[in-house]
C-alpha cells in the first residue's frame, strides 16, 4: 500500500508557511513545514515521494539552490516554486532547473491546490505528451511574428520593458502582444508559457531560445 503523499512547505515567513499548512490540511493533505531550506535538506535523504512547495527568496540557501539540491538527489520529486511579483526571471530559472510549476504572489487557494494535485498526479503517458506537443506547435503556428518574438522574450525571463527596448516598441504594445499570445496559446499563467516553450523546444534547459 502506497504511503500517503506529504507536501513539504519551505518558507522563512512564519505567517505564509502556517497559512499554506492550514490550507493544505483543510483540503485533507498531509503537510510538513520547514522554516529554512537548510532544515529541509537535513531530512531530504529520507524523502522519496510527495511534493515540495518552496519560496524563492530565503536567507542562506535560496529556493533556487534548494531546487538544484532536490533535482540532483531526487529528480522525480516535484517542486512548486513561489515567487514575489516581478520575479519572472527567477521563476523562469526555476522552470529550467526542473520546477514543475511556479506561483506568483498573490495567488488564490484554488490555484495552489490545483498545482499540488497536478504535481501529485504524476506524469502523463507518452502518447498524451506527444499529443500535447503537437497541440502546442499548432498554437505557435497561429502566432504572428511579433507575438512569437514577445513569447521568446518572456520565456527567456525578460521583463516587458526589456522586450520593448529589444524590439523597438513601447512597453504598452508589449503588454497587448502578451495578452494576445496568452489567449492564443490558451495559457493561464507565465508558467504555462514556459512549460509549453520547453516542450516545443523554443527554450531548452540551458535557457537558450531556439526555433
Image: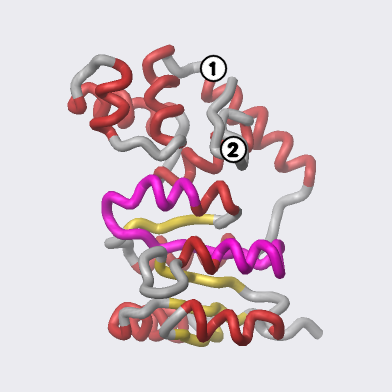
Residue 120 image-quadrant placement: bottom right
**Residue 120 visible somewhere in the drawing:** no
Q: Nearer the viewer, residue 122 or 70?
A: 70
Q: Does the segment drawn in magenta span residue 149?
A: no
- Residue 169 against residue 86 in the figure, above or below: above
How far is mark 2 from mark 1, CA to CA? Answer: 16 Å
Quadrant (top left/top right/bottom left/bottom right) for the N terminus = bottom right
Q: Quadrant of residue 106?
A: bottom left
Element carrying mark 2? helix
For label 2, the residue is 198
Q: Would you name the residue on which mark 1 appears?
A: 141
- Left or right: residue 168 versus residue 60 is left
Q: Position of residue 62 (x, y in %)?
A: 44, 68
Q: Going 43% across and 51% down the picture, which residue do you hit? A: 91
Instruction: Name the secondary structure under disc 1.
Output: helix
Is there any visible trace of residue 162 in the rendered image?
yes
Task: Pick the quarter of the image with the C terminus.
Answer: top right
- Between marks 2 and 1 in the image, the one whose residue lies nearer the viewer: 2
Residue segment shown in magenta: 67-93
Q: Is residue 170 above or below residue 54?
A: above
In the rendered image, the vertical position of residue 27 relative to residue 175, given as above or below: below
Amino acid at each position: 500500500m502506497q504511503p500517503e503523499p506529504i507536501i513539504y512547505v519551505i518558507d522563512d515567513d512564519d505567517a505564509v508557511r502556517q497559512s499554506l499548512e492550514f490550507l493544505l490540511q483543510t483540503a485533507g493533505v498531509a503537510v510538513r513545514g520547514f522554516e529554512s531550506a537548510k532544515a529541509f535538506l537535513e531530512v531530504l535523504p529520507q524523502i522519496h515521494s510527495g511534493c515540495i512547495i518552496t519560496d524563492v527568496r530565503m536567507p542562506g540557501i535560496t529556493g533556487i539552490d534548494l531546487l538544484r539540491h532536490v533535482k540532483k538527489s531526487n529528480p522525480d520529486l516535484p517542486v512548486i516554486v513561489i515567487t514575489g511579483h516581478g520575479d519572472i526571471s527567477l521563476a523562469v530559472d526555476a522552470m529550467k532547473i526542473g520546477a514543475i510549476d511556479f506561483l506568483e504572489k498573490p495567488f488564490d487557494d484554488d490555484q495552489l491546490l490545483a498545482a499540488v494535485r497536478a504535481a501529485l498526479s504524476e506524469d502523463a503517458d507518452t502518447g498524451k505528451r506527444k499529443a500535447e506537443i503537437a497541440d502546442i506547435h499548432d498554437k505557435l503556428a497561429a502566432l504572428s511574428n511579433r507575438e512569437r518574438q514577445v513569447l521568446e522574450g518572456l520565456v527567456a525571463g525578460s521583463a516587458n520593458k526589456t522586450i520593448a527596448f529589444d524590439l523597438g516598441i513601447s512597453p504598452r504594445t508589449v503588454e497587448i502582444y502578451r495578452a494576445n499570445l496568452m489567449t492564443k496559446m490558451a495559457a493561464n499563467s507565465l508558467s504555462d508559457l514556459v512549460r509549453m516553450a520547453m516542450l516545443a523546444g523554443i527554450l531548452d534547459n540551458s535557457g537558450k531560445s531556439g526555433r
